[in-house]
Image (cartoon, helix red, strand yellow):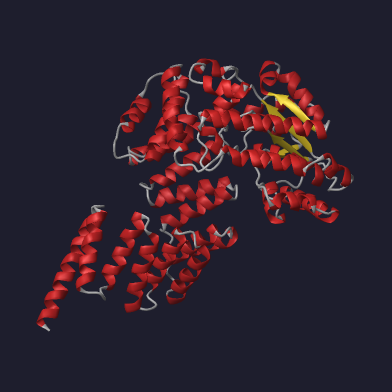
């Protein structure tokens, strides 16, 4: 008995050491101490639980799950352990199983606010947004001071394009926890989307004040700010960039931010050096091959042939509501939508996933293989149903406006499908000088898309695939696509806007000339530019970087 007590004291000693290490964020030492405690006392529930939490911090979610299960064997149906098991599964992306564990925790303790909040996260991961919102609200009802629940509710509102609600909930998060840096970051992003650039910058500064090493915040701060001199922000970014403890992702954000700052200052060589550092870091994290895109573009042209349209003439939904604004990203699509959305008859819905969602639902998402066969097998009923469903979806954004814009640039891949399911839709194709377009892509960060844009040669290859596909669409669908040049729009604004409105069968409205005064949500990388009058700064901008962009120019011309 005495020996058992000695063993228990040693186990407790190691456990307490682990807690101290964990509080000091010395996770390796904490891991080691908890394992020593468990080796002495295998049924040490608290040590198993704490070890599981350390493993979650390391991202070793499967091991964490096993630690929590071992603790659960000795303390069955404990709500905390059930909740932790759910978290481990959620972090693995196994949200359906995570939901089961969170529900088990809630059954054991219906007032367990954290479990309701975490259930919301798992439901959100499954795309069940209504149920997720209800779970977050349940957590808040139980504990009105649960800052995480308000933060998660705000993040969910962004996904549902309910930006006013997002602002409200981010501010509630901050009211509860004034040091919640991520809430300031999120609030800044939403304010930026709403065109409140000064308020957005102030919110980013609040996040940095809480944590001066919050490197990720400097990227949107730089995007929303116009630098006129070497200032404290540039100095802070450069100083932080030399910090060896930063992750590659943090260094990438700083490099993109510094690239933007030095471009504003006209220090082009410094600007491009930082941009190239940023793109090298990003490209190293991406599993992408240009052959994937080549196969996709080829399959699209094979599927949407002249015979395809001849056999399906007169099909589709004749509704004229949609105006598709498309082209390469950074070609002026946001500007064109802002102009049209300033017209009282037009609702600007932004970059919509509806068309892509429909292709996935129907089994014809952008990919080779089954894609080709599925396209060829679409019958009249399926084609009309897709058009009808698309109209129903976008009417959820506006019931009254005559026209609704869908500004998803990548819809240039789906022009054939648009023609089939919505033959009377209008398509505006935004064009831009190839070098300027590619430069703008290269110097901007896209979190989860446009993987071709971080290498100059791959970027040129993809751009040429796009040019070839657009020429194909014009040949087989004459008079269906309206080309609008960014450079012509900059040079002759009123004349080009009049032609654009004529194409859309819209009467003239002076508000379209003052588009930058229109207050609406713009959730793209171009949101700051869409809030300003048209300017010529970005025309022939690539000439500033002619030497560094030589591989791009050669590849495009080839």
- Find the residue positioned furthest to the bottom: 1
Q: Position of residue 12 (x, y in %)?
A: 18, 69
Find residue 339 and report its image quarter.
top right
Q: How many marks?
A: 0
What residue appears at the point 29 percent right and 40 percent down from the top-left corner?
Answer: 245
- Using the image, determine if residue 518 lies above or below residue 371: above
Q: Position of residue 55 (x, y in %)?
A: 33, 59
Q: Position of residue 158 (x, y in %)?
A: 55, 48
Q: Quadrant location of the C terminus?
A: top right
Closer to the camera in the image, 266 or 462:
462
- Using the image, determine if residue 140 lies above or below residue 457: below
Q: Position of residue 408 (x, y in %)?
A: 66, 39
- Using the image, determine if residue 433 lies above or below residue 91: above
- Using the image, determine if residue 481 lies above or below residue 167: above
Q: Is residue 82 visible?
A: yes
Closer to the camera in the image, 486 or 171:
486
Left or right position of 218 against 322 = left
What residue appears at the point 46 percent right and 26 percent down from the top-left corner?
Answer: 260
Q: Is residue 110 visible?
A: no
Q: Quadrant location of the N terminus?
A: bottom left
- Find the residue positioned furthest to the left: 2
């Amino acid at each position: 008995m005495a020996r058992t007590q000695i063993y228990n004291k040693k186990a407790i000693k190691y456990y307490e050491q682990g807690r101290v290490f964990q509080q000091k964020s010395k996770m390796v030492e904490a891991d080691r101490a908890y394992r020593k405690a468990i080796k002495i006392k295998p049924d040490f529930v608290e040590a198993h639980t704490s070890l599981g939490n350390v493993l979650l911090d390391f991202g070793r979610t499967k091991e964490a799950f096993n630690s929590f299960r071992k603790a659960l064997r000795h303390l069955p149906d404990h709500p905390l352990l059930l909740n932790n098991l759910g978290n481990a599964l959620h972090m693995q992306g196994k949200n359906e199983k995570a939901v089961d564990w969170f529900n088990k925790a809630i059954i054991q303790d219906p007032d367990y606010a954290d479990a309701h909040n975490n259930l919301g996260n798992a439901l959100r991961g499954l795309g069940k947004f209504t149920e997720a919102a209800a779970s977050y609200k349940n957590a808040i009802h139980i504990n009105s001071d649960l800052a995480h629940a308000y933060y998660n509710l705000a993040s969910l509102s962004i996904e549902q394009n309910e930006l006013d609600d997002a602002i409200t909930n981010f501010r509630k998060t901050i009211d509860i926890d004034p040091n919640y840096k991520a809430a300031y970051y999120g609030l800044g992003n939403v304010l930026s989307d709403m065109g409140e650039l000064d308020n957005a910058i102030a919110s980013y500064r609040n996040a940095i004040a809480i944590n001066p090493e919050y490197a990720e915040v400097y990227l949107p701060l730089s995007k929303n700010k116009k630098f006129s001199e070497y200032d404290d922000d540039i100095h802070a970014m450069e100083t932080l960039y030399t910090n060896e403890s930063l992750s590659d992702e943090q260094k990438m954000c700083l490099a993109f931010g510094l690239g933007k700052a030095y471009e504003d200052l006209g220090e082009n060589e410094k600007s491009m050096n930082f941009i190239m550092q940023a793109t090298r870091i990003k490209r190293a994290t991406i599993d992408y091959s240009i052959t994937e895109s080549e196969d996709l573009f080829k399959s699209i042209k094979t599927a949407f042939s002249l015979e395809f349209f001849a056999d399906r003439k007169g099909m589709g939904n004749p509704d004229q509501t949609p105006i598709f604004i498309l082209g390469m990203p950074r070609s002026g699509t946001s500007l064109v939508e802002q102009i049209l959305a300033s017209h009282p008859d037009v609702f600007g819905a932004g970059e919509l996933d509806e068309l892509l969602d429909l292709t996935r639902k129907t089994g014809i998402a952008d990919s080779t293989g089954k894609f080709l066969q599925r396209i060829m097998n679409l019958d009249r009923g399926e084609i009309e149903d897709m058009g009808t469903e698309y109209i129903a979806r976008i009417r959820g954004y506006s019931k009254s406006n005559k026209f609704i814009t869908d500004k998803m640039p990548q819809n240039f891949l789906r022009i054939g499908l648009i023609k089939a399911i919505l033959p009377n839709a209008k398509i505006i194709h935004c064009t831009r000088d190839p070098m300027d377009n590619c430069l703008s892509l290269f110097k901007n960060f896209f979190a989860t898309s446009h993987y071709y844009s971080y290498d100059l040669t791959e970027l040129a290859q993809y751009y040429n695939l796009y040019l070839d596909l657009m020429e194909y669409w014009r040949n087989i669908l004459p008079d269906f696509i309206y080309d609008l040049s960014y450079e012509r729009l900059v040079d002759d604004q009123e004349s080009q806007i009049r032609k654009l409105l004529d194409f859309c069968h819209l009467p003239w409205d002076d508000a379209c000339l003052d588009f930058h005064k229109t207050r609406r949500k713009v959730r793209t990388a171009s949101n700051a530019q869409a809030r300003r009058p048209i300017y010529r700064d970005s025309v022939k901008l690539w000439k500033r970087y002619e030497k560094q962009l030589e591989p791009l120019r050669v590849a495009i011309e080839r």
